[in-house]
Image (cartoon, grey):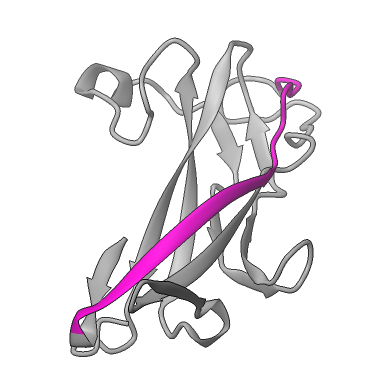
Amino acid sequence: TRTAAGNRELTFRIRIIQQPQLAKACGSGTILISPKPVDPPPVIGLVIFENRGGIEEDITSSYSGSLIAVANLDTAETGSGSTPNQEESRLPSVLRGSSASGAHYLRRPFAGIFFIFADLFVSEQGRYKLCFNFYENIKDPQKLD
C-alpha cells in the first residue's frame, strides 16, 4: 500500500499464478549445456485497488505507471532473498535467462497485470527459491499515480 497524489491510498495485491517445484540444471559457467527453462514458467498476477471511503475499487486497467518485476534466486536455507547479505552477493549467479519481466495486461485467468518469466534457467544443482522484486516507474512524478 502506498499514498498517491491527492492523498489517494493504492493497494497492490500480488498473487502467484504458476510456480515451478523442480527445474533441471543446465550446466555451469558461461556456457549453458542443453538449456532447459524452468517449467512451468513462473507467472505472477497483480491487481491494483484504490481505497475510496473504505471501499476498494479496482483501478488496474486505468493505472498509468510502468511496472517491472525482477526474479532473483536464493538458496532454500536463507532468508527472503530480496536483499542478500554481502557475502552471498559475491557468489556467481546461477539464474540465467531473462530475469526481468514487464507488465502484461490480460483478462485471464482474471483481469489484471501479469509478469511472465518464460526464459529462466538454473545453471547449478541445488535447492533454491525464486524471489521477486517489483519496481514502479511513475510517468508523471508530480502526480505519483
Is residue 98 in sight in this rendering? no
Based on the picture, tell me whether residue 82 belongs to the magenta stretch.
no
Q: Which residues are magenta?
A: 7-25
Quadrant where the C terminus sits is bottom left
Between residue 102 and residue 18, name the one nearer to us. Answer: 18
In-image side of 94 versus 27 (left or right): left
In-image side of 100 versus 84 (left or right): right
Residue at position x 69%, y 36% from top? 19
Quadrant where the N terminus sits is bottom left
Between residue 33 and residue 88, name the one nearer to us. Answer: 88
Based on the picture, tell me whether residue 13 belongs to the magenta stretch.
yes
Q: Image quarter for residue 18?
A: top right
Residue 52 location, x and y as percent? 36, 80
Residue furthest front in the image: 54
Residue 136 location, x and y as percent? 36, 67
| Residue 26 in the image: above or below residue 65 | above
In-image side of 57 versus 11 (left or right): right
Between residue 28 and residue 78, name the one nearer to us. Answer: 78
Q: Image quarter for residue 47?
A: bottom right
Instruction: Give the number of callouts.
Output: 0
Residue at position x 62%, y 24% from top? 123
Is residue 137 in sight in this rendering? yes
Residue at position x 52%, y 53% from top? 14
Residue 48 location, x and y as percent? 48, 69
